Image (cartoon, helix red, strand yellow):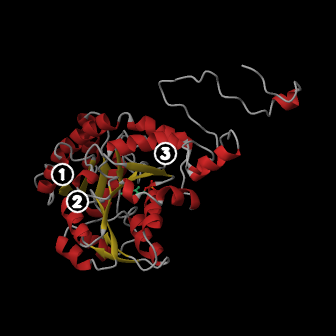
């Protein structure tokens, strides 16, 4: 390789930018491009790159190769025309709001959304002059009643937290389209290995890649997938509002995605076995899993998901909060209490003290969340090992 140094002095050689290898290597695993900025060949090419007339990279906030490689994988997983990566799942939701909505618009959002999403889509967007109505989206009539002529967006989650209600995506999409609105589905509790909302009629699908898609609890990232015709403002908003992702996170998430299908297959099989086992235990008053015939949305889940019902299982101990605390303590060495989900190993969370702590007691009761309610994120260990761990926990209740 020829040197392009100004001099041969160490103080000049050390800070000198390293030239790319020539010929460029062709590695099997994706390289990690940490660079925040790229060389331009000349001023007209710089302008062409910055205006998008020529494809390529200039500045990391406007786009970088690791985000593009990850976006392409997400796009294909969801059968989408376009995909964009944001720094977090919330960033992906914010990206959509900022790109698609404006003051005066109205949105309809599910009352079972992830708490932080609910805050973003009610009080935060309210500050921007966007009105929202919160409804029970398992009731299509109520959704229809909440939509008006200014309604631009309907927002639901494929599988809700923590009672794992399943959204009638096809029905909701039809309803939204009849009213001239679009449907956004947060698919974070399902992943495209369980459900592909665009195929069911949704206009947008969002994933917190932090959860099941990343799968290893080592990144925070989000993605948004949809149709070419809706994507005009996405790239600009991503850059202007500073929502761009980090190359390292994208690289890790892409690696995580290489095992998504087999992780979800194994975890979903485990989850069904665990749910069936929990259902037969005397200390448990309720088990929520869409794969169980007793779940209110089982038929819908069969229709939408076909083979896998996901890795999330929620159950309620009849002994209340004390039993919940005893169980969490007894299993902590094998099933850690972590208020997130989608990790390769089994973890649990306690909705009353974490995700749903902001609700009043009555609101929680109305949803069916009690002190003894525990949400499991089932991992890819053997089902026997998970059940053994849970049995130890139940013995302590
Ligand atoms: C975690 C989560 C989000 C937010 O994603 P972050 O990556 O934490 O910003 C949104 N929706 C659901 C359903 C989630 O579980």
How far, Cα to Cα, is label 2 from label 3?
28 Å
Mark 3 lies on a secondary structure that is loop
Label 1 element class? helix
- Which of the two discs, 2 and 1, labels the residue nearer the N terminus? 2
Residue, x 48% and y 54% (percent of image)? 88
Q: Nearer the viewer, residue 16 or 43?
A: 43
Q: Residues within 10 Å of mark 2 (few under 14, many from 20)?
A: many
Mark 2 or mark 3: name the one nearer the start of the chain.
2
Residue on which disc 2 sits: 169
Disc 3 or disc 1, which is closer to the eye? 1
Quadrant assignment, res 108: bottom left
Residue occupying image coordinates x 47% and y 60%: 233
Is any part of residue 213 visible from this angle? no
Rendering coords of residue 203 (x, y %) = 31, 59
Q: Which mark is residue 35?
A: none
Looking at the image, residue 111 sits to the left or right of residue 130; the answer is: left
Image height of 12 relative to 165, above or below: above
The nearer-to-camera label among 2 and 3 is: 2
Helix, strand or loop status at disc 2? helix
The answer to whether 156 appears left or right of 286 in the picture is right
**Crowding near pointer 3: few (<14 within 10 Å), some, many (20+)?**
many
Residue placed at 27% from the left, 44% from the top?
Answer: 390
- Work out how far the residue at label 3 is from the one at label 1, CA to CA, in angstroms: 29 Å
What residue would you read off at disc 1?
Answer: 304
* Residue highlighted by disc 3: 219
Marks 2 and 1: CB-CB under 8 Å?
yes
Cβ at disc 2 under 8 Å from ligand 1: no
Q: Upstream in the sequence, badge 3 or badge 1?
A: 3
Which residue is drawn at the image coordinates 72% and 30% (left, top)?
18
């Amino acid at each position: 390789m020829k040197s392009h140094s100004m001099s041969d002095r160490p103080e000049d050689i050390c800070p000198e930018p390293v030239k790319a290898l020539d010929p460029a290597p062709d590695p099997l695993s994706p390289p990690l491009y940490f660079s925040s900025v790229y060389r331009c060949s000349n001023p007209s090419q710089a302008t062409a790159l910055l205006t998008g007339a020529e494809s390529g990279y200039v500045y990391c906030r406007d786009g970088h190769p690791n985000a593009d490689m990850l976006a392409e994988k997400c796009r294909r997983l969801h059968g989408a025309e376009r995909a964009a990566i944001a720094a977090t799942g919330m960033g992906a939701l914010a990206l959509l709001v900022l790109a698609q909505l404006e003051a005066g618009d109205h949105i309809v959002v599910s009352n079972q959304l992830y708490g932080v999403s609910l805050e973003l889509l009610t009080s935060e967007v309210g500050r921007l002059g966007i009105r929202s109505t919160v409804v029970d989206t398992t009731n299509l009539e109520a959704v229809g009643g909440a939509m008006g002529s200014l309604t631009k967006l309907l927002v639901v989650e494929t599988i809700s937290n923590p009672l794992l209600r399943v959204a009638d995506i096809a029905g909701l999409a039809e309803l939204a389209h009849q009213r001239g609105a679009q449907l956004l589905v947060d698919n974070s509790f399902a992943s495209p290995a369980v459900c592909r909302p665009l195929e069911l009629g949704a206009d947008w699908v969002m994933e917190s890649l932090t959860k099941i898609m990343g799968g290893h609890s080592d990144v925070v990232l989000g993605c948004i997938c949809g149709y070419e015709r809706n994507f005009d403002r996405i790239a600009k908003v991503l850059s202007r509002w500073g929502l761009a992702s980090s190359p390292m996170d994208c690289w890790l998430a892409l690696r995580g995605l290489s095992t998504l299908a087999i992780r979800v297959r194994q975890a979903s099989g485990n989850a069904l076995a665990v749910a069936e086992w929990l259902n037969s235990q005397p200390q448990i008053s309720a088990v929520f899993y869409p794969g169980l015939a007793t779940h209110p949305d089982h038929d819908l889940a069969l229709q939408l998901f076909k083979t896998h019902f996901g890795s999330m299982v929620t159950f309620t101990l009849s002994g209340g909060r004390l039993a919940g605390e005893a169980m969490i303590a007894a299993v902590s060495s094998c099933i850690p209490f972590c208020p997130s989900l989608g990790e390769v190993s089994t973890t649990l969370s306690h909705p009353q003290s974490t995700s749903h702590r902001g609700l009043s007691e009555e609101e929680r009761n109305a949803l069916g969340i009690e002190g003894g309610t525990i949400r499991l994120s089932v991992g890819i260990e053997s089902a026997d090992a998970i059940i053994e761990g849970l049995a130890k926990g139940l013995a302590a209740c």
